[in-house]
Amino acid sequence: MARRREVEPLFDTVALVGTGLIGSSLARVMRREGLARRIVGCARTRRTRSVCRELQLVDATFASPRQAVKGADLVVICSPVSTYAAIAEAMAPSLKPGVIVSDVGSVKRAVVDTLAPRIPAGVHLVPGHPVAGTERSGPEAGFAEMFRGRWCILTPAEGTDASAVRRVTDLWRRAGSHVEIMDATHHDLVLAVTSHLPHLIAYNIVGTAADLESVTESEVFKYSAGGFRDFTRIAASDPVMWRDVFLHNRDAVLEVLGRFNEDLSALQRAIRWGQGDALESLFSRTRAIRRGVIEAGQAEVPGGPEAGTVIKCPGRKRRAGGAKPASARR
Ligand code: NAP
């Protein structure tokens, strides 16, 4: 893979603990933009490690986080959130003083509470969440354009070393993202609405359709363009990652789910009593929200479970599910 050398790297050695969809995308963009002199990857399975070497995503691979992070000046944990405690405990003795530890986990309060007590003093914790992705997994699924035009939310605790926060901010900016600093608990509430609840709804609706005995499986597939198809893409997202999201953002998800259930009951009542005005008024408001998403530039990469649903932009070809988004094929 071509490396761009004319710009000064931001980091000497970056260790990615987890080199699946997100970790490998980060490796790819760091390579392309010359953001690190050396990138090492850590993965659980021999297969993932050998794919990473074959694709030249990293300079070296390790099975053990303790080995992988030795000498690194930035460590980014890119594995499912349920693995963080064991990873932090394993790597803690090898972290050099002054190293920055970051991550890409989709929930943030639980991540802070897990990592902060397990990393040694003198190590800077700057948690992050790139709000980007696709429903696919593994190192082959990543691509360097993943983060372009997306937001990356950083949730450092108050008093975190400012230069560490700045360096992680620079990393994501040079990967093409906009960066926002946010409180971890607030992040979890925002993402519960914009990402976690939509996934729960998709998992549920696809499960309901699968269980409906009066509708055959072939009819579900055949007529899926009526809206169901978009839910199936989201509901194809990684089961382990999403299990972890719901287990680690329980309070916020339950809160927005409560609101959602109330609103759904109101819609049910409106349908039962033929209240067309109520339905039309809601659907008009939601149409305006869609326009807001497009105007915020967040509607153009339909691939991601965290990037919203498939887009119908005038003049744009509709992308087949699972293919790279248009911006990734540039
Ligand atoms: P993924 O494609 O399944 O990759 C997970 C990686 O973690 C794999 O390389 C896996 O190695 C490795 N891993 C698992 N357990 C490990 C352990 N105990 N020690 C070291 N490595 C381990 O998952 P992903 O989609 O990239 O998600 C990774 C993180 O990104 C999650 O925390 C998720 O919340 C966050 N995130 C995901 C998305 C998305 O759209 N997918 C978006 C934003 C953030 P093996 O392959 O060898 O098992």
Image (cartoon, rainbow, N blue to C red):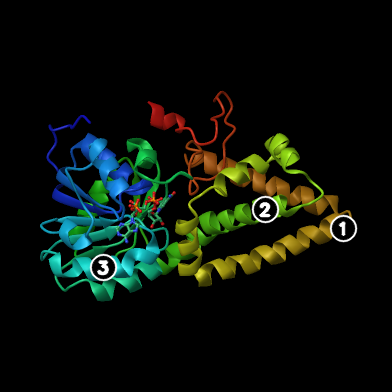
Gap between marks 3 and 1 measured at Cα: 53 Å
Is mark 3 in CB contact (under 8 Å) with mark 2? no
Residue 316's disc is none
Q: Residues within 10 Å of mark 3 (few under 14, many from 20)?
A: many
Residue 88's disc is 3
| Residue at image mark 1 | 272
Disc with the residue nearer the chain's start (3 vs 2): 3
Residue 148 visible, this orientation: no
Is ligand 1 less than 8 Å from the beta carbon at label 2? Answer: no
> Residue at 26% across / 47% down in the picture?
49
Report helix, strand or loop for mark 3: helix
Is ligand 1 less than 8 Å from the beta carbon at label 1? Answer: no
Percent from the top left, x then y, of residue 240? Answer: 46, 58
| Residue at image mark 2 | 205
Disc with the residue nearer the chain's start (3 vs 1): 3
Gap between marks 3 and 2 measured at Cα: 36 Å
Gap between marks 2 and 1 measured at Cα: 21 Å
Residue type at numbered disc 2: Ile
> Residue at 57% across / 36% down in the picture?
311
Residue 122 visible, this orientation: yes
Of circles 3 and 1, which is in front?
3
